[in-house]
Image: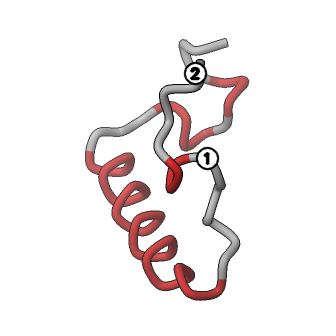
Amino acid sequence: MNKLGKVERKNMIDEPAYASIAANLAKRLESWMRRTDDPLLAGLGNGPYQ
């Protein structure tokens, strides 16, 4: 049985109504990755997560 709620079953990232929220979250994530010198900023193949 699927334990996801009704609102969790559809990915809303491309919905225009959520564009500003998605952009804000992406900006915050990139900022955090830069502050923590996240190796994924160099690309998926260059970090310890290969």
| Residue position for label 2 | 47
Q: Residue at x 70, y 71 (%)?
A: 14
Q: Quadrant of residue 30?
A: bottom left
Q: Residue at x 58, y 25 (%)?
A: 2
Compared to residue 4, the image places residue 8 above or below, namely below
The nearer-to-camera label among 1 and 2 is: 1
Q: Nearer the viewer, residue 45 or 3?
A: 3
Q: Secondary structure at mark 1?
A: loop
Q: Position of residue 15 (x, y in %)?
A: 66, 77
| Residue position for label 1 | 9
Q: Secondary structure at mark 2?
A: loop
Compared to residue 7, the image places residue 18 above or below, namely below
Q: Quadrant of residue 17?
A: bottom right
State the mark number for residue 1: none
Q: Give how far apart the Cα atoms at labels 1 and 2 are.
A: 31 Å
Q: Position of residue 50 (x, y in %)?
A: 67, 12
Compared to residue 18, the image places residue 29 above or below, namely above
